[in-house]
Image: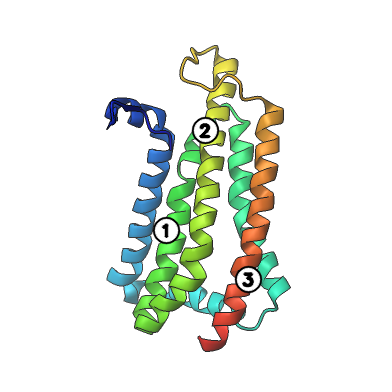
Amino acid sequence: MKKIVRGGVVNTKTFFSDNKITLIFITFFTVGISIGALSLGLFEEKSIITIKLIEKYFNENSSLSIIELMSRNVLSSLIYLFIIYCCGLCAIGLPIIAIIPLIKGISIGMIISYQYIFNEIKGFLYSLNIIFLPTAIFVCILNFAYCEGINMSIKVSGSVFNLNQRDNNNSLTFIKFTKRFIIFAVAIIIISLIEALLTGVFSKYY
């Protein structure tokens, strides 16, 4: 986030204006986590299918090798990145990009809620090590990709529909956009390896 400081005081209006996309991302992601956590906590008896899927996910994790875990993590994470990339190149991709953090937040919220409901403190500690550490980094990368995708989609839609693009990043080109997403993808692969290693270690105690 950028911070506009004048005389030691943050200019609130400028701060929100310059970081509105990141703030939207944080808002949707937080709402998603809340929905995911509450959906299992409040409707546990009506979420049998979801609970069984999550249970199957964790059971499979304990039997997979580090490479298999990494492959699974990379695939699931790159799907989000690929959707943002493709939508960023579409004139009408903005609405789809906007809900990505909501969907990611819901999935994380459900997993954390499942761990706490069925494993209590042990489940919370498991989530802390397996989910929070690598996911926190992944969410930061997703946020960068989110901002790039929205800016690019606005630029493309402005070009197609001849809209005024005063607030758009006019220096963003297809080449720059693609290069940044390649960097994001490499970072995701590294994070997925770390997550797989953590999962392999802590799954033994799960």
| Amino acid marked by disc 3 | Ala
Dot 1: within a 10 Å radius of its alpha carbon, few (fewer than 14), some, or many (20 or more) residues? many
Point out the frontmost of discs 1 and 2.
2
The disc, 2 or 3, on the residue closer to the chain's N-terminal end is 2
Dot 3: within a 10 Å radius of its alpha carbon, few (fewer than 14), some, or many (20 or more) residues? many
Front residue (pair 80, 46): 80
| Amino acid marked by disc 2 | Ile
Q: Is residue 91 visible?
A: yes
Between the C-alphas of marks 1 and 2, the distance is 21 Å
- What element does badge 3 sit on? helix
Name the residue located 40 percent from the left edge and 28 percent from the top edge: 18
Please say if 20 is above or below 169.
below
Between the C-alphas of marks 1 and 3, the distance is 21 Å
| Amino acid marked by disc 1 | Ile
Point out the frontmost of discs 1 and 3.
3
The disc, 1 or 3, on the residue closer to the chain's N-terminal end is 1
Please say if 102 is above or below 21.
below
For mark 3, what is the residue?
A: 196
For mark 2, what is the residue?
A: 150
Name the residue located 41 percent from the left edge and 79 percent from the top edge: 123
Q: Is residue 144 left or right of residue 41?
A: right
For mark 1, what is the residue?
A: 106
